[in-house]
């Protein structure tokens, strides 16, 4: 299938500000791109628009990053891409095995450890009590995902940048990143490597779910590879497109500003399109059946 992505993010900067943006698709999707994957950075004042050229680099997790300094005033980040994605929903690796820690690749070990939002050391006993009875491997990883999905309530109004996995476990509410942080932490506590990811997850072959946004999910390392898991949207989906992966949200923020950056506009779209570029219609939501007295 063909998926077209676009974003338009705008800020007002009170003063000159250095920034980092992770708004490109992940390098692993390079062969699937059917267009450019440019990041347009513009400084806008009352009469002119000036393009800012970033410095690109690859971070220690393999993500493609853009680094730049923007003058005070209005700043716009925008981009558009076309990807030929798999015509299959998220794979379910029911037979994937859990590796003994001694057999894990060196670069995977960091995804067993505590990080900014994932306090693994505080969850060892909790995770063992909740999930110690489950068979190791996919069944254990899926059991943790399903438990978080069932215990945490989604609420945009409960988002805050300082919320950790322990906060989510205690409060039982939050946004997509909170679901994933708790699931990642519990998974690591049971000795399965887990990493937090961001990307596009549009309404593709599912009923319309509301205004577009970037999404967070996570991946577990089983059977020698990484598999997608999602404690918020806990069902196989079409069209997940990876942008960045790291230990938690601190590693993969779509923008990081070293100073005040006031968000003034945010729009994201990710849609299946035809070869001619027309959007593929979405299915209708199932009708609600009246309940008989």
Image (tube, grey):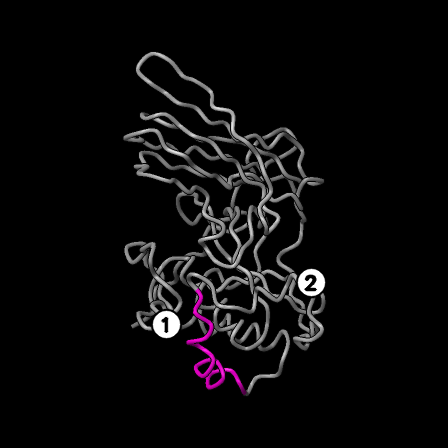
> Is residue 51 left or right of 100 when viewed as pictured?
left
Q: Label 2 vs label 1: CA separation?
A: 28 Å
Stretch in magenta = 118-132
Location of the C terminus (image quadrant): bottom left
Looking at the picture, does residue 272 appear above or below residue 75?
A: below
Residue named by callout 2 = 225
Is 79 or 126 nearer to us in this picture? Answer: 126
> Is residue 247 left or right of 160 when viewed as pictured?
right
Residue named by callout 1 = 169
Location of the N terminus (image quadrant): top right
Locate residue 249, reporting x and y percent.
45, 54
Is 168 or 288 nearer to us in this picture? Answer: 168
Looking at the picture, does residue 248 appear above or below residue 114?
A: above
Quadrant position of residue 34: top right
What's the residue at 36%, 61% (across, down)?
Answer: 154
Dot 1 lies on which element? helix
Locate residue 89, reporting x and y percent.
62, 56
What's the residue at 32%, 37% (across, down)?
Answer: 261
Farthest residue, direction top:
47
Considering the whole magenta stretch, tell me its main secondary structure. Answer: helix
């Amino acid at each position: 299938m063909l998926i077209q992505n676009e974003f338009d993010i705008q800020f007002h900067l009170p003063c000159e500000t250095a920034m980092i943006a992770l708004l490109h698709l992940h390098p692993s999707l390079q062969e699937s791109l059917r267009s450019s994957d440019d990041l347009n950075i513009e400084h806008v004042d009352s009469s002119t628009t000036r393009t800012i050229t970033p410095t690109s680099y690859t971070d220690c997790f393999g993500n493609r990053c853009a680094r730049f300094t923007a003058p005070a005033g209005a700043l716009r980040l925008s981009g558009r891409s076309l990807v030929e994605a798999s015509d299959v929903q998220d794979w379910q690796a029911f037979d994937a095995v859990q590796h003994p820690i001694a057999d894990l690749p060196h670069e995977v070990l960091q995804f067993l450890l505590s990080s900014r939002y994932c306090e693994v050391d505080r969850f060892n006993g909790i995770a063992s009590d909740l999930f110690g009875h489950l068979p190791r491997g996919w069944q254990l990883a899926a059991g943790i995902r399903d438990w978080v999905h069932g215990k945490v309530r989604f609420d945009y109004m409960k988002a805050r940048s300082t919320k950790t996995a322990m906060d989510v476990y205690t409060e039982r509410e939050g946004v997509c990143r909170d679901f994933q942080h708790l699931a990642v932490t519990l998974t690591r506590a049971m000795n399965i490597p887990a990493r937090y990811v961001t990307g596009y997850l549009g309404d593709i072959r599912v009923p319309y779910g509301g205004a577009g946004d970037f999404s967070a999910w996570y991946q577990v390392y089983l059977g020698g590879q990484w598999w997608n898991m999602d404690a918020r949207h806990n069902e196989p989906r079409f069209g997940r497109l990876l942008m960045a992966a790291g230990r938690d949200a601190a590693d993969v923020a779509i923008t990081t500003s070293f100073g005040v950056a006031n968000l003034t506009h945010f729009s994201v779209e990710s849609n299946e399109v035809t070869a001619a570029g027309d959007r593929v219609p979405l299915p209708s939501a199932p009708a609600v059946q009246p309940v008989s007295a």
